[in-house]
Image (cartoon, grey):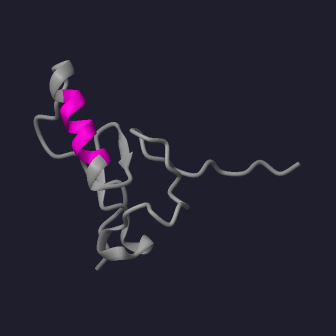
């Protein structure tokens, strides 16, 4: 049986990147995700906000921007 590559998912709610509600930069999947952190992808502004609040409460908030999860397009 062929091994399938795992579908990237939101680290807050586990929504898969193949879900139509997953937010992409500029609305285009080819441009990469609209939200991410140093721990992974986030699917929406709501999950990005929840992630930031949870990290702040834990004392593990990011001190600098996380690198882009996909290379910049020219």
- Examine the structure image and report whether residue 49 is included in the region drawn in magenta: yes
Q: Is residue 61 above or below residue 35?
A: above
Q: Is residue 42 above or below residue 31?
A: above
Q: Residue at x 58, y 52 (%)?
A: 7
Query: What residue is shown at x 36% (from left), y 75% (from top)?
Result: 27
The residue shown at (22%, 28%) is 55
Quadrant that contains the C terminus: bottom left
At which x and y percent is residue 51? 27, 37
Q: Position of residue 62 (x, y in %)?
A: 16, 35
What is the tally of numbered marks visible in this picture? 0
Q: Who is closer to the viewer here, 64 or 46?
A: 46
Residue at the top extreme? Answer: 58
Question: Which quadrant of the view contains residue 28?
Answer: bottom left
* Residue found farthest to the left: 63
The single residue placed furthest to the right in the displayed view is 1
In front here: 45 or 39?
Answer: 45
Is residue 52 left or right of 30 when viewed as pictured? Answer: left
- Magenta span includes 54: yes
Residue positioned 55% across, 61% down in the render: 18
| Region rendered in magenta | 47-55
31 relative to 35, above or below: below
Q: Which is the main secondary structure of the residues drawn in magenta?
A: helix
Q: Give the x, y percent position of residue 12.
A: 39, 38
């Amino acid at each position: 049986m062929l091994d399938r590559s795992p579908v990237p998912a939101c680290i807050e709610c586990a929504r898969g990147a193949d879900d139509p509600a997953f937010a992409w930069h500029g609305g285009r999947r080819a441009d990469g995700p609209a939200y991410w952190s140093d721990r992974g992808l986030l699917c929406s502004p709501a999950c990005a906000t929840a992630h930031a609040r949870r990290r702040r409460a834990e004392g593990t908030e990011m001190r600098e921007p996380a690198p882009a999860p996909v290379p910049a397009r020219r």
